[in-house]
Amino acid sequence: MGVRLKTLPIGIQSFEKIIGRGSLHVDKTACLAKMIGGEAEVWFLSRKF
């Protein structure tokens, strides 16, 4: 039996849909806290690849 990978939620904006469909979710709250607190040297915010 192989490992089942989660799908990427490309184009899905709703957190409920992402979780409900079993898609991959990455929580970047800690990264944002560092940026706001001034600990990050570089800011790169992008919604596209």
Image: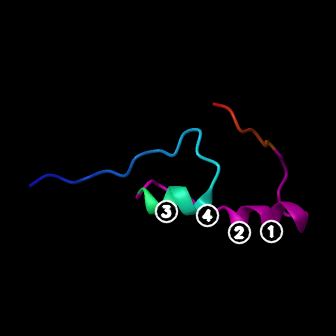
Residue 39 in the magenta stretch? The answer is: yes
Q: Reading the chain from its start, which is encountered first: label 2 or label 3?
A: 3
Determine crowd level at label 3: few under 14, some 14-19, many 20+ residues with C-alpha closer than 10 A: few
Q: Which residues are magenta?
A: 22-43
How many numbered marks does the figure carry?
Answer: 4
Secondary-structure class at tag 3: helix
CA separation in Å, label 3 and label 1: 23 Å
Q: What x and y, as percent, mark residue 46?
A: 75, 38
Amino acid type at circle 3 is Ile
Residue 26 in which image quadrant: bottom right
Q: Is residue 3 left or right of residue 42?
A: left
Q: Reading the chain from its start, which is encountered first: label 3 or label 4?
A: 3
Q: Specify the label residue 33 is tagged with.
A: 1
Determine crowd level at label 4: few under 14, some 14-19, many 20+ residues with C-alpha closer than 10 A: few
User: Quick one: which residue is furthest to the left in this view?
Assistant: 1
Q: Which residue is mark 2?
A: 30
| Colour setting | rainbow
Q: Specify the label residue 13 is tagged with.
A: none
Q: Specify the label residue 19 is tagged with.
A: 3
